[in-house]
Image (spheres, helix red, strand yellow):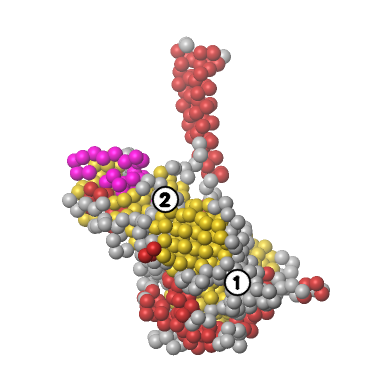
Amino acid sequence: MSLFKPSLRWAYIAAAGFTIILIFWPARRVESQNFVFYLPSQRKLVPVETIGNAAYLPLLPVLNLMGQVSALQEKRGSLRLWFGAYQLRFRLGQRKVELNKETVMLPAPALHVHGQWMVPAAFLSIILPRLTGQAIIYKAGTGRAFIGNVRPISYTVALEKEPSGTRIEVNFTGKVAIQTASTNGKWVIFMGSASVEPLEPQISFQDPYVKSLDFDDQDGQPKLILSPAEPGMNFYPHLTNGGQTLIVDLVKPLLATGQPPALHAPAKPPVTVLPVVPPSARPVAAAPQAPRLPAIVLDAGHGGSDSGARSRDGILEKNLVAQIVGRVQSALEATKKYRVILTRPGDSDPTFEQRTLTANTSLPLVFLTFHAGELGDRSPVITVYTYQAGAAPAIATGAPLELFTRWDEAQQPEIGKSRQLALDVQQQLTRIQGAIVPQPQQAPVRDLRSIAAPAIAIEVGTLSPEEDAGSIASAPFQQQLAAAVAAAVEQFSPGGAPK
Amino acid sequence: MTKRTFILALIIIPILVISGFYLRALYRRTFFENRQRPEDEIRTQLTQEALQSEAGSQVAVSLYFPNYDTGELIQEAREMSLAPNAEDQIRQIVLALIQGSLQGHARSLPSSAALRAVFLASDGTAYLDFSSDVKRNFPVGIESETLAIYSVVDSLAANIPGVKRVKFLIQGQEVDTLDGHADLTSFYTPNLVANSPG
């Protein structure tokens, strides 16, 4: 047939090639993270999406952070808005932006995704400074911008070998204040109000004691996360040089001859958290001379992409419970009787098994998980739960099974103590003015199922899309709650052991 | 190139290109997009139609709906035409819970929830496979999730003697929790003691 003449062969080949390319062209990659705006008096988070290879920000939330959009007009495929003295016009899929009478080019086109107009992050440095009249420092490829007179500090890292460990020296270009926490076998060094732009967000080491030092500010809190190369290391951080140099000593603990192992010593990850002060004389053998303090494990529910419940005024359960856990941690540490282990660092979302592993390997005195949810119209209601299995646990058949506790039934032998702890906590919580605290309940709470220690869940109130969060989001309420929980833990274990 | 060949080429090349677009869309729909929703909708529709056609005589059933203020389930009596088959009865009870209370009690399951499949094993375990929509518009929390679970378990156990315990699946998979709180890795036996009559 004449259709297959050689003269047309190129057309068939081109059409076939085009078809194959279309089929296998990779689907548009979409990722979502937070973008941090360091404003002069606060920090704000805006979700950033990676679409294709470009980072995109939602246009209106960004503009509303910086000022007020006075009017906006959306037509099919175009958006016109008025911001201060400027009129902007975006066209869908086009890089051109009309700024008053001028045309400005963005490196990637404006898009309309999930009902929102999205602009490439370069909008921050190309257009936004002109709109706001403020200096904006934004380095392409990073997830943060510094607005107005906020000047980011950076840092360099040096490693020094020690006889039984490693010294890490972090030199900041400005002054910082730090707080530390231990979680999931890592140490987290919070840098408070500092505005930090790391030169290298992830630094890996070839060192027998330290694996990596990572920077994270996805939840708006700049922090360094130090991962040790092996479990059981002791951690001594301190600031020198007027707050511009952080020295962290990672020291392998050596037990003195004849000294019994420390009480409640964890079998696996490191959990020693010392106050942010240098040891009086930095030891070569940094063996703890006194028994380690008993551990309390605090679990803030949800995290990362799992926000949990949300109130009408936008309070997310993951953030609310993280705040409360922070206050409970401070209250417990102030007693100087306990060390606190957190199951999730920052805004991460460990699995239930990871949280359980962190808890069980710490051999904790108690485990407390915090949640919020639908508790009816009465507010604030605080409910304390112990674990209730959905069905009777499996029946052990034969002697070998008696040697072991099934992982998914690890809470069962502890139920009696858990109920006592729940009663102590409920009793203390009733002292919070205005709070309704019913008798402890039983529920199949997943976080509690495999905890091999007295364990309770505390649901701190109602977060519902129909209501504002109200008092549960207020600092005074949370302080009272934290103090009550700390008092209950002391009541439960006055001498550092369950009564 | 003859005129005839040229015209044929003009017709065939656009067809090939359009086919390419179609195949690309089909490929993405197959491998990248969740194609469960239409299937779920069809399942739900078929289930409802099947149940209506098999309806027998009216019997009194007890359904349990949550009361978030007391943390209990409230019993609601209702006349229903139950199908003869136990698995269809399970579907009917769950659909009635999805439909919601007729006496103004709170919902235990969102109206968007769909029951994809039911299997009643010989040991009395009812396997309920919900669509992922069961998590949408759901009041999140320990209490609300616990009440939702026992609303289903107790309603089934109270009305269908063959149901001894219940296992929840979502999209055919075992999942950790309903929505971050209540354990769905376990089997659930009824907990009728904690309920109050309506």
From the image, tell me which residue sits under label 1: A287
Report the amino acid beneath label 2: Leu
Chain for numbered disc 2:
A
Say which residue appears at 63% left-offset and 69% top-offset: A254
Which quadrant, please, contains the C terminus of chain A? bottom right
How far across and down, in percent of the image, does residue A173 sit?
36, 56
How far across and down, in percent of the image, does residue A134 sit?
24, 53
Is A429 displayed left or right of A265 in the figure?
Answer: left
How far across and down, in percent of the image, does residue A464 sit?
42, 71
Which quadrant, please, contains the N terminus of chain A? top right
Queried whether the magenta region covers residue A309, the answer comes back as no
Q: Are marks 1 and 2 on the same chain?
A: yes
Is B70 displayed left or right of A124 in the figure?
Answer: right
Q: Is residue A333 above or below residue A97?
A: below
| Direction top: furthest residue | B2
Q: Magenta part of the protein: which range?
A: A99-127
| Direction right: furthest residue | A398
Report the amino acid beneath label 1: Ala
From the image, tell me which residue sits under label 2: A199
